[in-house]
Amino acid sequence: FPVPEGITNEDFEYCADFLDTVIYEFHPALIIVAAGFDMYYADPIGNCLLTSIAYNHFAAKILKIAEELCEGRISFVLEGGYNVIGMPYCVEAVLKALLNEKYEAPLFEKDASLLGDSNIEDLKKIKNMLTKLLSPYWEHI
């Protein structure tokens, strides 16, 4: 799902909901997640605005899907992320989701959601384009 710069936690949730549809349609035997953290708001490369909470919610969501579709067979492969302060929190957030433990974001992330506005309207356009492109191949998109 191609995302615009400045994607927020709310935007990421919207993208994840669309990906759910594709994953359920595909019905995988195993899910492998490229666990990159360069969409973290303080990452110098990603130009996005996610906090560790977004990674926690995504990991919990994808784990639930893995439990439903492929008997919990899932692998998270550490990929990238270039903010040495935030990356450990993002990794912890994912691990807490996988362990079904409560995650609390660090206090310094509290105001990160104020850094940018939602891109939902742009994402809706991208989703519509993808739906049109993929619908001949995927029944429930």
Image: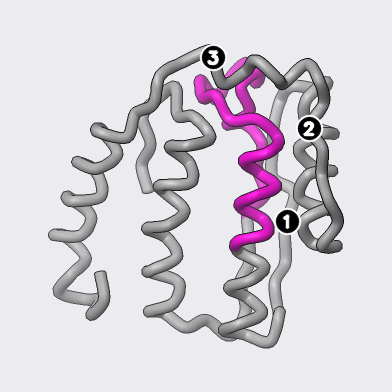
The segment highlighted magenta reads 34-61
What residue is disc 3 on? 114
Distance (Cα) linking label 1 and label 2: 22 Å
Q: What's under tag 3, amino acid-wise?
A: Leu
| The image quarter in which residue 109 lies | top right
Horizontal and vertical percent position of residue 73: 70, 79
Q: What's under tag 2, amino acid-wise?
A: Ala
Residue count near mark 1 (Cα–Cα under 10 Å), binned few <14, some 14–19, many ≥20: few
What residue is disc 1 on? 77
Left or right: 1 as drawn, with respect to 67:
left
**Tag 3, which secondary structure?**
helix
**Does the magenta-highlighted stretch encompass residue 41?**
yes
**Residue located 36% across and 42% down the image:** 2
Distance (Cα) linking label 3 and label 2: 15 Å
Horizontal and vertical percent position of residue 125: 19, 41
**Does the magenta-highlighted stretch encompass residue 15?**
no
**Tag 1, which secondary structure?**
strand
**Tag 2, which secondary structure?**
loop
The mark nearer the N terminus, 1 or 2, is 1
Horizontal and vertical percent position of residue 28: 52, 81
Would you place residue 43 above or below residue 140 in this image? Answer: above
What residue is disc 2 on? 105
Viewer-nearest residue: 30 or 53: 53
Horizontal and vertical percent position of residue 68: 60, 82
The mark nearer the N terminus, 3 or 2, is 2
